[in-house]
Image (cartoon, grey):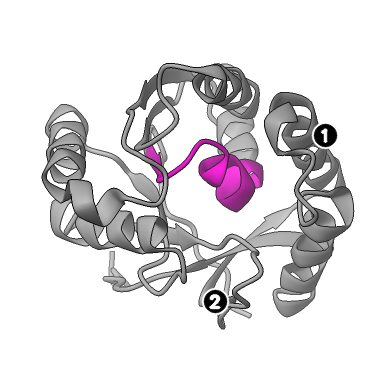
Amino acid sequence: MIRLGAGRTDRVVAVGAHCDDIAIGAGGTLLTVCRARPGVRVDALVLSGGGGEREQEERDALAAFCPGADLRVTVLKLPDGRVPAHWEEAKAAVEELRERTEPDLVLSPRTDDAHQDHRGLAKLMTTAFRDHLVLRYEIVKWDGDLGRPSAYQPLTPEVAEEKVRLLQEHYPSQRHRPWYDREAFLGLARIRGIECHARYAEAFDVAKLTLNLGG
């Protein structure tokens, strides 16, 4: 297992199709980055859930997952499950996000995610953020679409536990879902940890990576 650093991380972009996607897929990574880099700027874009209970859940959750960060959150009102039908609006939101930041790290859904909203947003990100480190997070679901990730962010046991606690605390609207529990979140983190010789980890796909071995 080779461990590579991404260099100085001063600006992060995190996107999700739905409220809680970012926290489920990359909450531990956000906690790790923000604790290591006080004042890091985090621009978060969520395509659906705006204007109601879900938006407030998301804003409170991301504030907790990004301690000490310069956090800027945008939550749109696209219908859940209908991102492909609202392609132009979603594309405009991603392009506007791109115009206002030059991130060192981008956290995005996977292009082969089984959910059409996740997959559609991921495809938009590949065209808007062409020359950036894009880590595509995974979300466990009934579709059984977990793959073989190519990048890992190890999580300390403290961070893994904090992620689970914050997910349970800040998204009460999701607690009734059969997959939304401690065992699911910690179980996946433990498996990904085994794969990278750590106790816990979050895993990502990386589409393209340019090396600077002589720098």
Vertically, is 203 above or below 185?
A: below
| Residue 172 x/y as whole percent | 74, 28
Q: Position of residue 43 (x, y in %)?
A: 36, 29
Q: Residue at x 37, y 47 (%)?
A: 105
Choose top left, top right, bottom left or bottom right for residue 28. top right
Residue 24 highlighted magenta (yes or no): yes
| Residue 200 part of the magenta segment | no
Which of 166 and 13 lies nearest the eye of the viewer?
166
The residue beneath circle 2 is 149
Position of 183 with respect to 8 (left or right) is right
Q: Residues within 10 Å of mark 2 (few under 14, many from 20)?
A: some
Q: Nearer the viewer, residue 180 or 14?
A: 180
* Range of residues picked out in magenta: 13-28
Q: What's the residue at 62%, 25% (across, down)?
A: 61
* Numbered circle sitting on residue 133: none
Determine if residue 132 is in view.
no
Evaluate whether residue 136 shows in this view: yes
Q: CA distance from mark 1 to mark 2?
A: 25 Å
Dot 1 lies on which element? Answer: helix
Depicted 88 relative to depicted 143: above or below: above
Task: Name the image quarter holding the N terminus.
Answer: bottom right
Q: Are marks 1 and 2 in contact (CB under 8 Å)?
A: no
Q: Which mark is residue 165?
A: 1
